[in-house]
Amino acid sequence: MISPVDKSSSLSRLLAFWWVLFVIVQQTERLFLFPETAALEWPTIGLLTRTLGTGLVGDMISATGAVAVAGVLGLLLAIPASRLSKTAKSNDGYRTGLNVALAVVGGLLLVILIVDVGYYGFSQQHVNFVFFEYLDDLLHTSGNETGASQAAEQTVAELEEGTKWGVRIGSFLLLEGLAIAGWWLAFKHTFAPLLARWEMQWPALTSAMLVAITLSGVAGLGPFQLSSSPRMAHDSEAFFNLAQNPLLFAQEPFRDAFLSQWSWTPRHMPGAMTVEEAVQVAQETLGRGASFPSPQYPLVKATNERVGVRFKEPVNVVLIFVEGLDRRFLGRTIDGSASSSQPIRLTPFLDRLKDESLYFENFFSNGVATTRGLLSTFCSYYPRQGTAAIKTRYDQDYLCLPFLLQKGGFRTEMVISLDSDIPGIRPFMARNGLERLYGESDFPTSAERLGVGLTDGALFGFMRTRIETLQSHGERFFLTALTSSMHHPFTIPLRHPEVQALQQHRDRYVAALRYFDLEFERFFTGLQRDGLLRNTIVFVLGDHGRHEPVGATDMERQAGRFLAPLFIWLDPSLRTPDTYRPRHIERIASQVDLAPTILAMNGLMPHVSSFVGRDLTCLFVRDCLHDNFAYLSSVYDDLIGLADQDGLWLYSFRRGLFQQIDLKLKGSARLLTLTATDVAPRYRRLLALYLTTNVLLERKQIWSWKELEGEL
């Protein structure tokens, strides 16, 4: 970029041009993002004014920081230049170096904004924790020789669909180009001459103004928080996000994504309590009268609940994590395309399976990413707030389902469609009782591969061969799997006409869901037909809800990420009036409840455990567990929450708000006062669970094989 400032111009005019330019390019991004934000919620004049005002302040602060960085870089560039040309004036050398530095910083800023625009279209947020975690996954697996990673596969799949994001980025660059050209012409013909006259008449005033702007910007880069505006925090999540400056917004998630790999620091919350107090409240919340015999491992408790259903002989377990399976999309009918005369049911097979199974209408994933879902399900422990424990704390001691099943005589296996799908999963699963993890390299060379990893059809085909082998050997087994076709960018086979029709829908998730339902029906009915599910119980659940923010309200878009379904299906050989009554269940349950349930029904529940979940087997035949709840943790929206029979209670760290909404997410969110009678106990429990479970994980005080194995 060529500056319209000639060599005779002062440094103040040079800096003024670039400072305003940096503000303009950031304001232009906000203008570009406004229509899609307004599509979610049309703002009032007051809300729009506060959004633009807050955004302008943030843009001015980041522009000052960018100019300051360029100033230091320009000085470094000027030093070698002055040595090479001793006859040149030092001021000219610095001006040249500064011009180069400002252009470099400006180019980097534009690149950051391009990335931010692309990500905002996906998440309605500026680059956040999930984006930086994705980059970290990409870096960790780029040199892996055993196979591709989900992050790498997703990147390739996105690049192959250049037309999808090319138009968006091209439109953004066109708008930025017009804004830059407009400012270039305006400065050259109007502002530069005006500043020149000011410098001649009031040189001291001009210098003082530049110093004031610099000092205000530097001050803002420290403790300044855009969310410190109470009005902006309360008004609207969508416009709160739009108001954020992408550079300032990225500071905290960048720190959490990378620094939390080494150490975790709790976020500030009103009414903060000590760790000792938090542990006591957490024990009261989770224990329900149980004893906690180990001061060193405070959540290890003695088993005190009566098992609802226990089979006479151990039963096989098939547990399927469906990528991004959101229960809001079950039972839905959608128009496929203009050429399709009939509406298309998205999940006809799953809808039938509901009535043949124990279907949990209020089941929740405890986290919003696969790594969190696996930890919660296998080890009955809440997700870490920060980089996932499976990735960064896999070498610690946990008490997990695969180990206890293996100890009870089960063969334990897992099938995933990518060899390096999740950093840390292989050592984590190997340490915690999984005998074999099958990845991409174990599939036949003819297995269909498309989009992110192998297709769901290929995955289910491989699972069938494993079930055939395990059943033929007559050994008890635990087989779990993780699908991938419903992962963004939803690249799937289009052989079925309904999938083809739905592929034209603006939301490509629906086509991927229809594809999964077809492949799962083929897999499941084939196993039933051939008697391969004898003596077997099948669990089907989402590893989390949808990644994409879907819904008509802020709360629905946030809480929807936890809305994963749960199906529990028993083979007819196991069904008796005392063991199984298919129905829809309204009681609260979450992923941490599955390990205790599977162990209890097989008579393998240990005498002591670190499990934070509950045995659900009493629900197999009757209504119970009225007081059960789910703890929720989102790295997307930077919030934690509780789900109980009275609704969802969510606390946002970013906005500093505690809100409540009904379990169906259809009512209006209620802004809560922390001292209210019905609010204070829940907030206290939420704070205690957040603090206790994260601190104990950091201190390696969840479980100890050396000290506690003898108590099992």
Image (cartoon, rainbow, N blue to C red):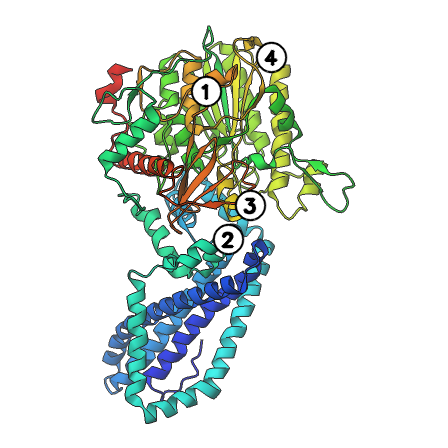
Comparing labels 2 and 4, the label whose residue is closer to the camera: 2
Residue of label 4 = 531
Q: Is residue 224 above or below residue 391?
A: below
Q: CA distance from mark 2 to mark 1?
A: 37 Å
Residue of label 2 = 124
Q: Secondary structure at mark 2?
A: loop
Q: Amino acid at mark 3?
A: Val
- Disc 1 or 4, which lies upstream in sequence? 4
Residue of label 3 = 550
Q: Is residue 451 above or below residue 193?
A: above
In the displayed structure image, the side of residue 2 where residue 348 appears, left or right = right
Q: Amino acid at mark 1?
A: Leu
Disc 1 crowd, CA 10 A, few/some/many (<14, 14-19, 20+): many
- Disc 2 or 4, which lies upstream in sequence? 2
Q: Is residue 323 above or below residue 129?
A: above
Disc 2 crowd, CA 10 A, few/some/many (<14, 14-19, 20+): many
Residue of label 1 = 616
Q: Amino acid at mark 2?
A: Gln
Do the residues bearing badges 1 and 4 touch, measured as CB atoms within 8 Å? Answer: no
| Residue plotted at (50% across, 33% down) | 417
Q: Is residue 147 above or below residue 117?
A: above
Q: CA distance from mark 1 to mark 3?
A: 30 Å
Q: CA distance from mark 2 to mark 4?
A: 47 Å
- Disc 3 or 4, which lies upstream in sequence? 4
